[in-house]
Amino acid sequence: PPQEGDAFYVATDERDAGALKSFRDRGAILLPDLMRMSDRRLFGWPLMLTDVRAIVEQELLAHSAFFTGTHISSVAGGILNMRAAHGADRRATAMD
């Protein structure tokens, strides 16, 4: 299980630089932190579109060790379905 001080991934559509800095200061890793220049060259401009990035993030979260989402989000529901299809342990998911 995650320990105090462990890094964690945050999928968000937040754009405010101050909020993003606050996430990172607490150990969050965001999609731009994971993408290398070679990824950007490989996938090109579509990777910069939020709908394409959302699909990349959904796949990432579908394969994550743990997932926490909100029950009012259709995206979170889709991720739950993908995790179930991949055989993820239900105990590694929390919905609030």
Image (tube, rainbow, N blue to C red):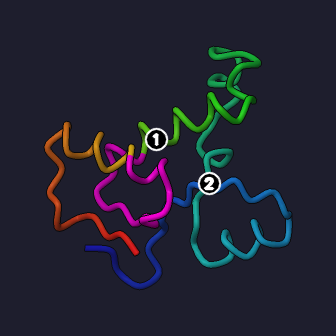
Disc 1 marks a residue whose amino acid type is Gln
**In the shown orientation, is residue 86 left or right of residue 25?**
left
Instruction: Please name whichever residue, 27 or 59, is drawn nearer the observer in this view of the structure.
Output: 59
Q: Position of residue 11 (x, y in %)?
A: 57, 54
- Is residue 47 shown in magenta? no
- Label 2: which secondary element: loop
Q: Which residue is drawn at 38% across and 51% down?
A: 77
Magenta region: 61-77
- The residue sitting at 23% across, 64% down in the picture is 92
Q: In which quarter of the image is residue 35?
A: top right
Quadrant where the N terminus is found in the figure: bottom left
Per the model, the C-alpha gap separating discs 2 and 1 is 13 Å
Q: Residue furthest bottom?
A: 4
Place residue 39 in its image quadrant: top right
Instruction: Please report the residue visible at 81 percent of the width from the left and 57 percent of the height from the top.
Output: 15
Nearest to the eye among marks 2 and 1: give it. Answer: 1
Left or right of 41, for residue 94: left
Q: Residue 75 appears at what percent x and percent y?
A: 48, 48
Q: Name the residue under label 1.
A: 58
Secondary structure found at label 1: helix
- Given residues 10 and 4, the one toward you in this image is 10
Q: Label 2, on which residue?
A: 30
